[in-house]
Structures are given as C-alpha cells and as structure tokens.
Amino acid sequence: MIIVTNRMKTKQGFAEKLAPKFTKPGPLQEMEGFHKVEVTITENPKDYDELNVNMYWHNYEGFQAWKNSDMFKEAHKGTNTKEAKQDSPVIDSEIIVSKVASIITSTKN
C-alpha cells in the first residue's frame, strides 16, 4: 500500500473550507487500486494553514492510472491557469509518496 500526500499551504482560514472538497463522492472511488482519502489539517502553523490530502492506494500503478485519467484532468481543469493561481487560496503544494512499511490496529473493535 502507498500513501500519496498532497501537502498544501493555504491562506489562513481556508483549510477548513477546502477539506470537504477532497472527500466528495466521485469517480475516484471507482478507480482500480484506490482505497480511501483522508484529509488532515496541521494545528497551529503561524502564517498559513496546512492541509494534507492523504490518498491511500493498494499500489503505485493505481495512483498513476488515476493521475493519467480523463477524470483526473477533469477534476483539475482550470487550476493551472495564471488567473486561477492568482485567485487560489493555495500558497504552495508538495506531493509526497510514501510506502506503508508497518501497521498496527486497535484490538478494541
């Protein structure tokens, strides 16, 4: 399993507003190899908000298929224009790919 994290710095006050946009039902859920998305907000940064969109995939190939799909392109349409970047609350973004190396779960379920 891999976790693909999009770590975003946003203008203050925007992380809470943006978080639900990443967990709306849609075609991502039908992608081969997709497991789940969870969104976390880092507490107490000084000059910005930090939003972490964690996408869990059974394998890297599934993520690559999503990234190269028409659905991905449609979901991100218009976000790379100069005007969109100027109006965006996102200050910076970094993609981090991590391989899950070890897991422990609760025994109280």
Image (spheres, rainbow, N blue to C red):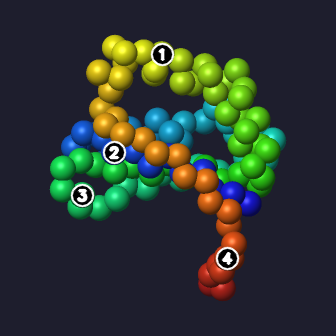
Q: CA distance from mark 1 to mark 4?
A: 38 Å
Q: Please name the amino acid that badge 4 sits on.
A: Ile
Q: Please name the amino acid that badge 3 sits on.
A: Pro
Instruction: Looking at the image, tell me whether mark 2 or mark 4 is earlier in sequence order.
Output: 2
Q: Please name the amino acid that badge 2 sits on.
A: Lys
User: Are dots 2 and 3 in contact, CB under 8 Å?
Assistant: yes
Instruction: Looking at the image, tell me whether mark 4 or mark 3 is earlier in sequence order.
Output: 3
Q: Which mark is residue 9?
A: 2
Per the image, the residue denoted by label 4 is 103
Q: Element under label 3?
A: loop
Describe residue 109's horizontal placement relative to residue 5 as left or right: right
Q: Quadrant of residue 29?
A: top right
Describe residue 54's horizontal placement relative to residue 9 as left or right: right
Residue at image point 77% right, 54% down: 58
Q: Element under label 1?
A: loop
User: Residue 26, how many percent across, how many down?
Assistant: 64, 32
The correct choice, above or below, for 51 with respect to 29 in the image is below
Task: Categorize mark 3 by other alpha carbons within 10 Å: few (<14), some (14-19), many (20+).
Answer: few
User: Residue 70, how many percent across, how many down?
Assistant: 70, 21
Instruction: Looking at the image, tell me whether mark 1 or mark 4 is earlier in sequence order.
Output: 1
Instruction: Looking at the image, tell me whether mark 2 or mark 3 is earlier in sequence order.
Output: 2
Task: Categorize mark 4 by other alpha carbons within 10 Å: few (<14), some (14-19), many (20+).
Answer: few
